[in-house]
Amino acid sequence: MSKQIMTKNTAIEKLKSGSLGIAVLCLIAAGCNAAFAVARLITAAHDIADTINRYMVYRSCISFVISVVIMVIAAVMFFRISKDGIPFTAKNVRSVRIIGILFLLNAVIPSVTAAGFIGTAKGVGGMVNPSALVEGLLFLFIAHIIRYGAMLQQESDETL
């Protein structure tokens, strides 16, 4: 079994092409989420007489909008990586941190905002999305990893 050694240029080219593909997928996902939010509002507009259904429609639409913003930020970040071939930059740290914060907001804001739209309903306003909390914390931790990588990248660039 022979090990194939990847050169730096090969790794950068793979990173560039893969990042471009991911950026396009993020934009497609953003478009789908936007379409889902609009479709959810249109189809549910006639059938949201009771408070719980109205709450669920508003909550899902708000969550879809936050997801669109997350996907657009991710697409911009991946387009930047596909252009430069460098994932460890201060801009990417900032993008990943913003994505993490948006996930944290997505855990709470849709429920609170939807409850505000319909007025307070028993037990409705207190729902928190636990998976969005974990995703937010995960992205915030990944931002620290990318920041460390950016520091190492800067040290490497300065020594050459």
Image (tube, rainbow, N blue to C red):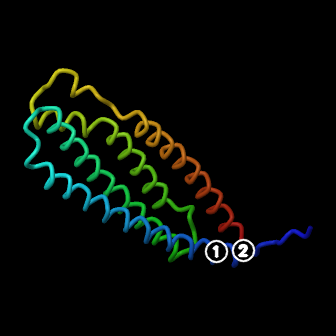
Using the image as rendered, state which of residue 100 and residue 46 is in the foreground.
46
- For label 1, count other residues whose C-alpha is less than 10 Å away and answer few (under 14), some (14-19) or many (20+): some
Residue 141 placement, left or right of 38: right
Query: In the image, is residue 138 above or below residue 148?
Result: above
Using the image as rendered, state which of residue 156 and residue 73 is in the foreground.
73
At numbered mark 2, what does the secondary structure look like: helix, strand or loop? helix
Query: Mark 1 highlights which residue?
Result: 12
Residue type of the residue flagged with mark 1: Ile
Instruction: Locate residue 67, reporting x and y percent.
Output: 33, 53
Furthest-right residue in this view: 1
Furthest-front residue in this view: 47
> Residue at image x 37%, y 68%?
28
Residue type of the residue flagged with mark 2: Lys
Query: Mark 2 highlights which residue?
Result: 8
Residue 87 placement, left or right of 9: left
Instruction: Locate residue 34, reporting x and y percent.
Output: 26, 60
Instruction: Locate residue 117, reporting x and y percent.
Output: 11, 37
Residue 28 placement, left or right of 148: left
How many circles with numbers are drawn on the protein? Answer: 2
> Residue at image x 45%, y 72%?
79
Instruction: Locate residue 33, reporting x and y percent.
Output: 30, 58
The Cα atoms of the two marked residues, 1 and 2, are separated by: 6 Å
Contact between marks 1 and 2 (CB within 8 A): the answer is yes
Query: In the image, is residue 6 above or below residue 98?
Result: below
Which image quarter: residue 13? bottom right
